Image: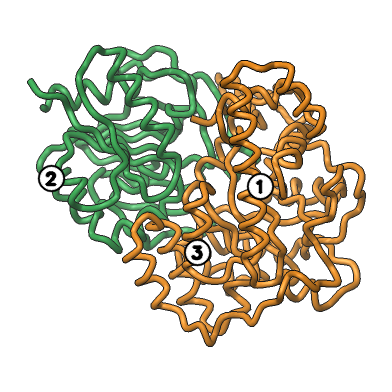
Chain colours: A orange, B green
Amino acid sequence: MIPLSGDLGNSKGVVRENVGSFSTIRGTSTLKRGFAHMLKNGVVMDVTTVEQAQIAEESGAVAVMVLDKLPSDVRKAGGVARTASIRIIQEIMDSVTIPVMAKCRIGHVYEAMVLQETNVDMIDESEVLTPADENHHIWKWDFTTPFVNGARNLGEALRRIEEGAAMIRTKGEPGTGNVAEAVIHIKNVNTELRRIKSIYDAGDEQDLISVARELKVSYSILEETASLGRLPVVNFAAGGISTPADAAYLMTLGCDGVFVGSGIFKADDAKERAQAIVLATTFWEDPDKVKEAQKMIDERQSMLGLDTKNLDLRMQERGSTA
Amino acid sequence: MSGISIGVLAVQGDVAENIMATKMALEELGLEGIVNEVKTPEQISDLDGLIIPGGESTVIGTLSMVNGSLKKIKEKIASGMPVFGICAGMIMLSKKAKDKVIGEMDQPLLDYLDVKIERNAFGRQKDSFESEISIDKIGISKFPGVFIRAPSIIETGKNVEVLSKFNEKIIAVKQGNVVGTSFHPELTGDLSLHKYFVNLIKAKH
């Protein structure tokens, strides 16, 4: 079972209040990480309009992520990509019952503040947008709203959790319709988890400390992770998922759920595809059900996609060394 | 007497936490039993008790309708099987749900608990909170309430027993062998509600 408590229980994001005769507390690690637990085995879908958000909800999305442009259009447009229009985020919040997330730029503390004030359910500090500060991510303990962050390997994931991220997703290579990078990232994390688990099981603290230095993380979070043999927060796959089989494959690699970016609303059969990806994520252990899901889509209508080898812009590298 | 078989509906949501809490509850009570994830009508038909965990009720409802699990759960409830619905699970058990912002909902429900639910009754995630509550009616005087985008109950039928309130809002109910809570006992270290539910199953078994 994944622990719910994190460090820094008394940070700025934690708010104590009295409601009637009850004393309450908001913004705790239990509430932030607990929120991510409620998303498990689900599909979070990128949307840009109210109509898309409603299609996502009807298709069984567990939450929607609001962007100004889908990642593949961000890639095409170039220029600076920023957080989505607040008015559109609010319209979407007023038209679906499922959680609404939105992205802010890496390190952009005030875009995140604005999203917290807008009352989105989770903030994605995302490499899809143009970073505002490549050297420092947001100190997420200062927020009452939970955050999800991308990671390509164990070190990145644990550094983000130490900054207060309540949930992790693989970065993959956004907007490519190509799942290859997401597969590499989740396998990287799994390989590194197996490595530290075996060091932990052997009781070799000296080696564990040297891994902590190598990954630039604290000993305590590395030890906790090593003892669990998994990330201490919910971990989703993201980046390039386009088909039901893509989603099911990532679930078999140990992800707790998936984010789908351009893959749904850049396809010509968005509605069927959204339903099919949800089915495949829910019933990933049953190949026959995944086949039925895959049958619901037409490969000729999948987004064309890009080879990730020759990209001008590799979004996954943004903020990865910090 | 053979052990009891408890299932946690594993369509979507925090399944693992409920499995863990139920196993620990069995152990503390010194009872024999097994706890498993269940997804299909076949798995559900063999159960003595079922937990419907937290998650998104629209997702759990839609997907358990797809493979016939919803219908099977309805039959099992009608035959007296105890069911514990947590947050989304309680919404699933209800006859009627509306959303605080969106209004009346048309989502697949189990149509058993004679209550009307208000979804997201305490607000969005930023308003999610922890608070100590009491469930005196079933002998739990103090309980750590973890409310995550929690629903509340705004109307109850005559067969529904109100177990707990938070600031005048109903947050736990019981009708026959069906129990529902707005909050998440599986996210706390406190096993008293899971133990209470296991005892309900045992009494029926």
Q: Which mark is residue A57?
A: 3
User: Which corner quadrant holds the C terminus of chain B?
Assistant: top left
Label 2, residues with CA under 10 Å away: few <14, some 14-19, many ≥20: few
* Amino acid on which the number 1 mark rests in the picture: Asn
Residue at horizontal 20 percent and vertical 46 percent from the top: B44
Residue at image position (39%, 71%) is A293
Residue occupying image coordinates x 50% and y 46%: A40
Q: Amino acid at mark 3?
A: Glu
Q: Which residue is mark 2?
A: B78
Q: Which residue is mark 1?
A: A188
In the image, is residue A87 above or below residue A267? Answer: above
**In the figure, residue A135 lies in which quadrant?**
top right
Disc 1 and disc 2 on one polypeptide chain: no
Q: Position of residue B31 (x, y in %)?
A: 21, 16
Whether pointer 2 and pointer 3 mark residues with C-beta atoms closer than 8 Å, the reply is no
The crowding category of the residue bearing disc 3, from other C-alpha atoms within 10 Å (few below 14, some 14 to 19, many at least 20), is many
